[in-house]
Amino acid sequence: MPLNSRRLPKLQTERMRRKRLKLAAVTVLSVLLTLALLAVGLYYIIRLINSRFYFCAGSLKFVPVTKACDGNADCDDGEDELTCMSNLSTNTTYPVRLVSESLILQVFDQDQQWRTVCADNWRSWYTQAACQQLGYSHPRSVQVPVGSLPSEVGIAFTAVTTEAQEPSADIQNVLTARDQCSSGSVISLACSDCGEVVGLNRIVGGVDTVVEMWPWQVSVQWDGHHVCGGSLISKQWVISAAHCFTGRTRELRSWRVVVGHTYLTSSGGISVKTIVLHEHYSHVHNDYDIAMLLLNWPVEIGDSVHPVCLPPHHLSIKEGEELVVTGWGALKENGQISSVLEKAKVPLIDRSVCAKASVYGSAITPRMLCAGYLSGGVDSCQGDSGGPLVYQSSRWQLVGVVSWGAGCAHKEKPGVYTDVRQLLDWIYAVLEKYP
């Protein structure tokens, strides 16, 4: 038999084997592609269903998402009314505060008077109690000579009673009024490592930046889409604007907070346990435009994730002093939001100027501040809402929340921000109510 005739069956067998391998590979790839398409399709179907319906796990039924958190129990066990946004109003003065850039500790006593806390008989556990009452868990205190106190601190004093051994839940319960401090010193608290930038040294008219410069900046997202900015004030609390949550379901399931990213992304979002809106918020007048979000778990502090400080009471910022606003807002009015974090330096505008008839007139309330340029050109814009306006003294402090304005960067229409300094009592009341 010729040589080539003996090799023919072997060649045919090899070709058939290769053909079967190719066919198997194509089949496997087709199956994988089909599964991938089904998974993607299922993902979007689930998102679509979740955006329109609330699933009652206890009774295994769906109700329209608009009926969740409407005050009526539509699920058999009422679960659709359990995880909802809440409102909180406080008409009382929060009894503990820090005053001036020196962070002097004061308490509001039974005589309705603010008193500065003396260093007399002060111990480390009192520092811990006072910091916890302010919502923080990193207690530190120093003694400041009475003679160096700023004028806004006043001359009324209080001190730990000699009978006190350990503090109760409220530090004011172990204090008694004094005419003077026998130690000659008062207490200054630093309860948090906030406001420190440990990393590197598009808002209309702004420039690209990195989150390591502003590690408290977060993205507040609904159903995977960026809605507003926000500011991390502790490992588990974020401050944003109340108007970010109007017109959407008050049910918490679809809300996420993304931290630690320069480029806008929806990955790695942290679910939200509680959203608290100021009860007096008015979408008509934009007043009391503040909200607080409690995350389901604490963030891990690092170069790109770090809280900003709340300002002390009586923090004085002069007209024209430089503030910084950051966010992923539109680069121009009615434009697309930016994919990269941006910053802009904006000077403080005096309230009397902002309340002129040619600017915003009577629309400016005591809970608002203005920052920017009356000539226009630099401003916060759509998508920046809820984000931070910060001021640097010894540390970076959150003095404003991006709230509203007439357009973006228009002449004589600067950005209007919620004045955080005017709402500290409410913020501390929220921290105390939802520990």
Image (cartoon, rainbow, N blue to C red):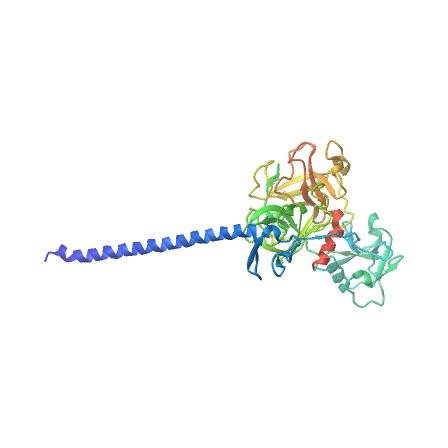
Question: Percent position (x, y) of residue 174?
Answer: 82, 63
Number of labels in the image equals 0
Q: In which quarter of the image is the N terminus?
A: bottom left
Which quadrant is the C terminus positioned in? bottom right
Q: 43 or 321, which lies in front?
A: 43
46 lies left or right of 135:
left
Q: Which residue is drawn at 57% across and 61% down?
A: 59
Rendered location of residue 275, percent (x, y): 66, 53
For this rendering, which residue is in front, 400 or 160? 400
Q: Can residue 383 be seen in this view?
A: yes
- Image position of 358 with respect to 103: above or below: above
Residue 259 in view, yes or no: no
Residue 58: percent from left, percent from top: 58, 62
Hey, which quadrant is residue 336 in on the image?
top right
Looking at the image, residue 381 sits to the left or right of residue 98; the answer is left
Q: Residue pushed farthest right?
A: 179
Residue 16, by quadrant, is: bottom left
User: Between 276 and 250, which is closer to the camera in this rendering?
Assistant: 250
| Residue at the spot 68% in from the left edge and 55% down from the top edge | 193
Rendered location of residue 148, percent (x, y):
82, 51
Q: Which residue lies furthest to the left in this view?
A: 1
Q: In which quarter of the image is residue 410?
A: top right
